[in-house]
């Protein structure tokens, strides 16, 4: 009898532990704080003390944007009190975790319906989709094997070109270095879809080659799909040898000004751990290799992230100064933002990443500072709903963002394509005469 009671108790406690983790965020509050003065922005830094176990979903250094913090239930009174003493404006969404999407989410009807680019998919489904594209359009799409992720997922680069031997400039887009930012891989997949299937996209393929890596961090991405408690995971899933902690922030792991600002050196930090050394992660090594192998032709790099509707350019490691050619970066970003707005979307906030908040080891800085890519950006897609961007809205926003990519392509084509060299020469002659 005693054995049975112990067994039942054992089962109940295992079940409770299971539930506790699954429900982890259920009673957390999302607090959106709106600073209006420099002093308030500075004061917000004090909330970052690890003792309070707050998770910063978005930081803001400017006044027309919120700092979004996920707060455990027992810390809510502390944060509210802090906010009041600083005279800050804020919104509080209680029980935030209950809004998170639940677990492995591929209902059978989806399988029957086939692949829609306006849905969130598993890594495997995305891989099957790109395989399919390359089989159906071998004249346009080729896949390059990149090797495997930390947990052994096979990664492939999608290359789309209507004239692979022309020596065209390359636009390289990656997405999903941050696991929870689901809208970014969805955008990358949508780009593949439009470039391949839309007859009008021939214009975007004229004189430009597109390289797209839809999910840089597949292990993290799949982890966010396994349970509601994991939905907000950001890092990779590599294991730290000394501590029982997992993951590195891939966007702090690139080898340019590594770890000089905006990082954590604690492997158990869930957000911004920069890793034990630059390029410690196999996934960032793959992106680095793509950039190095194509450095001569690579003219535009865009890393897709979410959220906040920002389009930012180097430097990211510092907000103290800008690159010499910052005006070119800024002008193109503004044209892209205008195009998105014209298509009915929200404009982007355009500035250097470091003026937003300094953080070193990002892929954008590496592309610009080491590889010499003349146009390099991080694009933070969508505003509202934080990382849980509703699937039903994808069919509205993805085509709007696509218009921004058409503007990017137009610029790269006219500035760098061998096809347009004659036209460029004529224009400079006219300028001189
Ligand atoms: O902090 C990041 O890595 C990016 N924002 S996110 O909310 N998606 O995590 C911004 C990166 C901007 N670029 C650099 N700081 N280099
Ligand atoms: Zn991100």
Image (spheres, grey):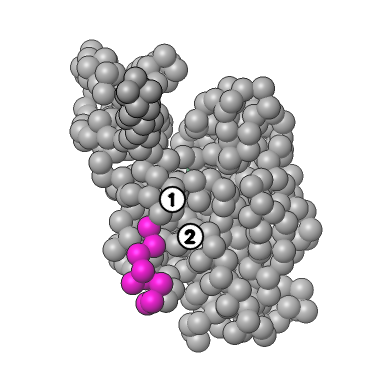
* Quadrant in the picture for the N terminus: top left
At a point 41% along the width and 72% down the height, the residue shown is 111
Q: Which residue is mark 1?
A: 225
Quarter of the image that includes the C terminus: bottom right
Residue 83 on image: x %, y %: 25, 19
Instruction: Please identify the quarter of the rendering in which residue 202 is found.
Output: bottom right
Q: Is residue 80 above or below residue 55?
A: above
Q: Are marks 1 and 2 in contact (CB under 8 Å)?
A: yes
In this rendering, is residue 145 above or below 167? above
Picture quadrant of residue 192? bottom right
In the shown orientation, is residue 431 left or right of residue 84? right
Q: Which residues are magenta?
A: 105-113
Which of 294 and 334 lies nearest the eye of the viewer?
294
User: Foreground residue, 307 or 392?
Assistant: 392
Q: Main secondary structure of the magenta part?
A: helix
Judged left or right of residue 57, residue 305 is: right
Q: Is residue 377 left or right of residue 7?
A: right
What residue is disc 2 on?
122
Residue drawn at the location 71% of the way across and 67% of the way down = 144
Residue 238 among magenta residues: no
The x, y position of residue 154, in whole percent, is 66, 59
Seen in the picture, residue 268 relative to 183 is either above or below; the reply is above
Element class at badge 2: loop
């Amino acid at each position: 009898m005693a054995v049975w009671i112990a067994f039942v108790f054992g089962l109940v406690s295992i079940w409770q532990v299971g539930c506790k983790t699954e429900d982890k965020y259920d009673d957390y509050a999302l607090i959106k704080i709106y600073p209006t003065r420099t002093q308030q922005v500075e004061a917000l830094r004090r909330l970052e003390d690890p003792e309070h176990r707050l998770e910063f979903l978005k930081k803001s250094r400017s006044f027309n944007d919120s700092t979004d913090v996920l707060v455990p239930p027992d810390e809510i009174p502390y944060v509210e009190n802090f906010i009041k003493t600083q005279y800050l404006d804020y919104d509080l969404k209680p029980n935030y975790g209950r809004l998170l999407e639940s677990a492995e989410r591929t209902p059978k009807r989806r399988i029957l319906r086939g692949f829609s680019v306006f849905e969130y998919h598993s890594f495997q489904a995305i891989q099957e989709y790109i395989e399919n594209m390359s089989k159906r359009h071998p004249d346009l799409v080729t896949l390059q094997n990149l090797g495997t992720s930390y947990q052994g997922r096979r990664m492939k680069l999608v290359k789309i070109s209507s004239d692979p031997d022309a020596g065209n400039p390359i636009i390289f887009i990656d997405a999903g270095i941050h696991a929870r930012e689901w809208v970014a891989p969805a955008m990358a997949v949508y780009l593949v879809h439009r470039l391949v299937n839309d007859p009008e996209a021939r214009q975007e393929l004229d004189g430009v080659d597109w390289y797209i890596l839809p999910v840089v961090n597949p292990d993290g991405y799949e982890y966010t799909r396994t349970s509601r408690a994991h939905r907000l995971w950001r890092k990779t899933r590599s294991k730290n040898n000394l501590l029982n902690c997992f993951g590195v922030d891939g966007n702090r792991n690139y080898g340019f000004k590594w770890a000089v600002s905006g990082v954590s050196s604690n492997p158990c930090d869930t957000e911004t751990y920069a890793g034990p050394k630059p390029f410690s992660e196999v996934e960032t090594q793959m992106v680095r290799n793509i950039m190095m192998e194509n450095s001569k032709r690579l003219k535009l790099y865009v890393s897709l992230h979410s959220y906040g509707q920002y389009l930012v350019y180097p430097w990211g490691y510092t907000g103290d100064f800008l690159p010499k050619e910052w005006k070119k970066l800024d002008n193109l970003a503004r044209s892209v933002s205008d195009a998105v707005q014209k298509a009915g979307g929200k404009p982007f906030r355009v500035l250097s990443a470091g003026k937003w908040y300094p953080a070193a080891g990002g892929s954008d800085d590496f592309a610009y500072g080491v590889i010499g890519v003349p146009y390099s950006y991080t694009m933070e897609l969508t505003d509202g709903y934080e990382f849980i961007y509703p699937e039903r809205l994808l069919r509205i926003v993805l085509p709007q963002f696509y218009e921004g990519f058409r503007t990017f392509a137009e610029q790269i084509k006219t500035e760098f394509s061998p096809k347009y060299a004659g036209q460029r020469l004529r224009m400079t002659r006219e300028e001189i005469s």
